[in-house]
Image (tube, rainbow, N blue to C red):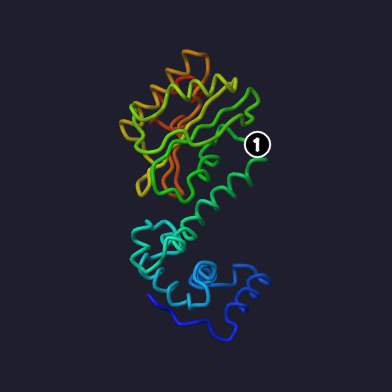
């Protein structure tokens, strides 16, 4: 796919405008146009930005699109990599930015939501806490469907013991779905809870995230039969 060459220093003006004013003064298609400068040299990226936004329906949907779909717009693997990097980098930024904030264990939905920014496939996230609710470890421990055969329960227990954790919380996402637990989610939660109980460690929550929504099983009716030690 061919695009016309950049004319009249347009790119330089746009870059200077951004550095002086930030991203807020630009429309979504202009912001996308600027980003594409760094993957498509010396060609008009304005028309492509418009086309991508129109085709996918929103700014975030462009970055969430699969490489296969993006390739249909004539984008190379190099150019697709740049687009796919953006939500991943945004997630890493949010995680690092919020590290210094104390973890509020009574509302882990807030803590976990950032961990799933830009994720289009299902993953499970693990958080280990000490006796003062300080973070000992956090990270993805499972990718793919969340069920009792795929979730590494033994690894959860091993990590909790190795870090001498007092409490454990897990979270997983429902890409394109709703933040409500399935029957398998409940079964898996109970298995993790029981496995940790055998070594004297508490599972304090299982959070389910869907887009910007999240639900805490420990603080909802769904998990009442599991999190029996939680106060009503």
Q: Name the residue at 38% across, 43% down.
A: 174
Q: Quadrant of the N terminus?
A: bottom left
Of all residues, the one furthest to the left in this rendering is: 183
Q: Name the residue at 50% across, 54% down.
A: 87
SS class of the residue under badge 1? loop
Residue 203 percent location from the top left of the image: 49, 24
State whether residue 183 is above or below residue 50.
above
Of all residues, the one furthest to the bottom in this rendering is: 8
Depth check, front residue: 229 or 2: 2
Residue 20 percent location from the top left of the image: 69, 72
Residue 107 percent location from the top left of the image: 54, 36
Q: Mark 1: give few (<14), some (14-19) or many (20+) Cα within 10 Å.
A: few
Q: Answer left or right for 111 relative to 102.
A: left
Q: Name the residue at 53% across, 46% down.
A: 114
* Residue matched to label 1: 102
Depth check, front residue: 229 or 131: 131
Q: Answer left or right for 72 relative to 77.
A: left
């Amino acid at each position: 796919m061919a695009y016309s060459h950049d004319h009249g220093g347009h790119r330089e003006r746009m870059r200077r405008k951004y550095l002086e004013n930030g991203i807020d003064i630009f429309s979504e298609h202009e912001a996308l146009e600027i980003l594409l400068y760094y993957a498509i040299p010396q060609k008009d990226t304005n028309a492509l930005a418009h086309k991508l936004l129109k085709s996918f329906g929103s700014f975030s949907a462009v970055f969430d699109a699969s490489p296969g779909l993006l390739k249909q717009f004539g984008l190379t693997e190099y150019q697709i990599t740049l687009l796919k990097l953006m939500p991943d980098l945004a997630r890493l930024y949010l995680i690092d930015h919020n590290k210094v904030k104390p973890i509020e264990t009574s509302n882990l939905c807030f803590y976990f939501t950032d961990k799933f920014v830009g994720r289009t496939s299902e993953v499970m996230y693990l958080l280990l806490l000490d006796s003062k609710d300080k973070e000992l470890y956090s990270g993805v421990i499972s990718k793919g469907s969340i069920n009792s055969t795929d979730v590494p329960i033994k690894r959860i227990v091993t990590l909790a013991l190795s870090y001498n954790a007092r409490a454990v919380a897990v979270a997983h996402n429902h890409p394109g779905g709703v933040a409500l637990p399935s029957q398998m989610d409940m079964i898996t939660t109970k298995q993790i809870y029981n496995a940790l109980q055998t070594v004297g460690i508490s599972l304090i929550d299982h959070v389910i995230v869907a887009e910007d929504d999240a639900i805490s099983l420990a603080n909802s009716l769904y998990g009442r039969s599991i999190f029996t030690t939680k106060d009503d």
